[in-house]
Amino acid sequence: GKYEYDLVVIGGGSGGLACAKEAAQFGRKVAVLDYVEPSQRGTKWGLGGTCVNVGCIPKKLMHQAALLGSALKDAQHYGWNIAQPVHHTWSVMAQAVQNYVKSLNWGHRVQLQDKKVKYFNMKGSFSDPHTIRGLTKAGKETIVTAENIVIATGGRPKYPTHIAGALEYGITSDDLFWLKESPGKTNRSFTVFCILPSGLNLLSCSFPLVKSALYLPNTPNREKVVCCDKHFFAYCDYCSLRSAMDFCKLWEQSIVMDYAHQNQLKTLVLASSKKAPDTKTLNLETVGVKTNSETGKIIVDASEATSVPHIYAVGDITEGRPELTPTAIAAGKLLAQRLFGQSSELMDYDNVPTTVFTPLEYGCVGLSEDAAVQCYGSDNIEVYHAYYKPLEFTVAERDATQCYMKMVCLREREQRILGLHFIGPNAGEVIQGFALGIK
Amino acid sequence: QEAAKYEKKVMVLDFVTPTPLGNSWGLGGTCVNVGCIPKKLMHQAALLGQALQDSRKFGWEFAEEVKHNWMTMTESVQNYIGSLNWGYRVALREKKVTYENAYGEFVGPHTVKATNKRGVEKLYTAERFLIATGERPRYLGIPGDKEYCISSDDLFSLPYCPGKTLVVGASYVALECAGFLAGLGLDVTVMVRSILLRGFDQDMANKIGEYMEEHGINFIREFVPIKVEQIEEGTPGRLKVTAKSTKGNQIIEGEYNTVLLAIGRDACTRNIGLDKVGVMINEKTGKIPVNDEEQTNVPYIYAVGDILQDKLELTPVAIQAGRLLVRRLYGDATSKCDYVNVPTTVFTPLEYGACGYSEEAAVEKFGEENIEVYHSYFWPLEWTVPSRDNNKCYAKIICNIQDNERVIGFHVLGPNAGEVTQGFAAAIKCGMTKEQLSSTIGIHPVCAEV
């Protein structure tokens, strides 16, 4: 044919790899370019994207480590005699998690090989609508041409650069999961502060492995914050919490660094809700792919097509889509099926279930109460809710005051469920089946 | 409790005939006292033991030797049960339901006699009656069974650690108990007459058995005990069990501290005067046949729960049936209890959640060529770091090809199986098809997304 490849995918993460592997199933000539620009602190990783390396996977494993810490406390109530002291060694956990992630990197490389997908560890950018220029770390250049191109470069954490010291002293999730040593010693002189506009997930990593405090300013997902933060307060040392509130006021006035020195801050973890999509270096203007001027994300239609007909985009890089691995994977697969497999099925982004893996997990699917009221009016909505106590909490004498669930329904006749929200242990496992029911 | 809402004059008679070893308990029935609740708590204790092992791989450090104290656990569990007993008494009082701790039996039409612990008898009449007496564990009928063996009725309040235990039976009661006892560090053997988990999907049952065996529980298959003798008294003592093969004349002997019988349960319908009012029971099983409105052959007498013939022996089913019955009798409701597609979970070391048809039942009903089975092994993310089995967790769905590949059976083997199964049961009731299942986005990373 005219072009070297039927499909070139830029970005070897959840969406990109799923799309590439699916296209290869149809016997197409496919290539994937994946490159990790090191973080501000120099952290980098292998093939697999955010989810595998600095997202879902290490997050859930560290969350599990923290849950096991609670389990150790519970176990004593259930008759297990554990000699004190019990302590946690970050490096043992980090090593185990990082080893597992590396096995996944390797697994992906093997899969690409098995499916005969060509893999380039290079940073891709557009030379012209059908030509991608790949650049290795050393500066070596490779040019590939493709009939179809999928951009799946995802996003990276955004630094609040208007605050002095953030860039020099702060780390992000890109770095947290790869730290070899603990981010903070567990004694009173060192405290880790997490600034979380909505990145609640990180808390489960740093707590209770280190003493931490948090700040949760108003966010659109008000209900998530309100329900979860009392729980965190219960866990956190109240005096450090106080300091955190003060700290954050100072933060907003940009005199954070003085305060940090006064309180001997060891590590500052920043978790911004806004991810910066990796579109700047792609050279999209040259080929005419339109992005949202405010967010920088690529604008796509219902079939994942950009403003340029043969150029597509999936995953976190796309405007208006949930930033989730399973949706990126599904969208990538369906796209490949439409391009090469005679399918016409479009991705359904409605009612996608998700879970926030905070110490007390929050699983949900469908509309939030606010969104439902906005959409249908509060007179047409009925909300059923209940507090409950997991049986396992009884003997363990754990606080269940935040274990709560609610169902947002239409008030008329059969009361169709618009949204389901559950806070409690194993929230993801609970919600998954109900997501099916809602569909 | 539901009837009281309609301002009916209601009385509850509850009485626990002590076990052969003298054990008894408070208000709440099997589930609360000697079933679901203590079972799940002890299962949780065993799971926490496993969590302790896992936690070392996640960086937690503590002394190598960790021991379990049976008394600490049992006391906590019994305290919680006590709070539930009390809670029920308070709830009944608040709803103005009269409660008598007395043994009830029919003596004539519309009349019951209530006999309390001290033998004092009273007579009561009522417009309607509901029989919900449940079941009690069955004994083997061999020498030494009632004198030396315990049942689930005794296990959850045993005032000493059971030690090396022989569990006789292959029901979910047997396997769940064997499972948590082993998880607490005890030496456990299960003696099985024929198959595991009769009535459940056998493919899944075998996987459960395999997992248990690989994790230190001994199985003696195709043997039944014929004699239990005491070698030494004690708490626990030492018992000698003699067993005979079901396939020949081979005899084996074994020594155990405790023998737990879990071979089945018998309905409590033989000694409550049903003959005096003409309520028909199945003579062989003791169970009461009812119509789809839980009515016996005597129009003013109803029945719910474990004693019903051909219905599921589950707490949530009994609760639902009881509530709906009352709403039909005293409210305007017409809905009947739906006994189809009831989800359930077996809390063995590797938990098993199921809803709908087993593979065998589906093949029998629809024919092998008309069903399609989709299945997958999976490795929970939480098991990766501690290097736990990567080929044991398993999920399968059974679909009816002729009906749009509608999902008619759901089976999952893995952690938190109950939590996973619950939502899928709702979806199955909605008539979910394979296509809908496949196109629903997964939550990542959790087991349920498989």
Image (cartoon, coloured by chain):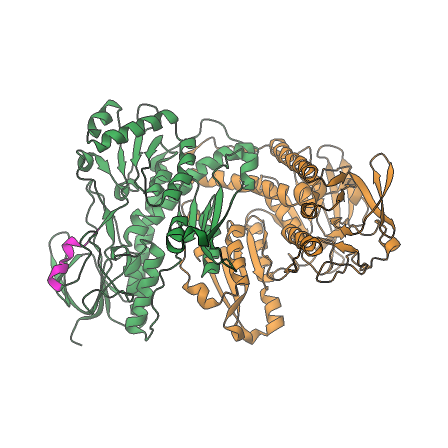
Chain colours: A green, B orange
Please give left or right for residue A416 compared with residue A174 in the image.
Answer: right
Please give left or right for residue A2 compared with residue A270 in the image.
Answer: left
Question: Which residue, as the protein is rendered here, is positioned at the far front?
Answer: A379
Decide whether the magenta segment is chiefly helix, strand or loop: helix
Q: Image quarter for residue A329?
A: bottom left
Please give left or right for residue A156 compared with residue A56 in the image.
Answer: left
Quadrant of image for the C terminus of chain A: bottom left
| Residue at image coords 32%, 74% | A341
Task: From the top left corner, tell me how far across and down residue B436 is, in percent.
Answer: 45, 65
Task: From the top left corner, tell me how far across and down residue A173 is, in percent.
Answer: 28, 43
Q: Is residue B63 magenta?
A: no
Q: Nearer the viewer, residue B257 or B411?
A: B411
Label count reads 0
Asked whether the viewer can see residue A191, the reply is no
Asked whether the viewer can see residue A20, the reply is yes
Q: Where are the magenta residues, as a range?
A: A277-287
Q: Is residue A283 magenta?
A: yes
| Residue at image coords 28%, 72% | A339
Depicted A287 relative to depicted A388: above or below: below
Depicted A236 relative to depicted B383: above or below: above
Task: From the top left corner, tell me how far across and down residue A75 is, in percent.
Answer: 52, 35
Task: From the top left corner, tell me how far across and down residue B192 is, in percent.
Answer: 68, 54
Q: Nearer the viewer, residue A140 or A67?
A: A67
Q: Image quarter for residue A182?
A: top left
Q: Nearer the viewer, residue B418 or A289?
A: A289
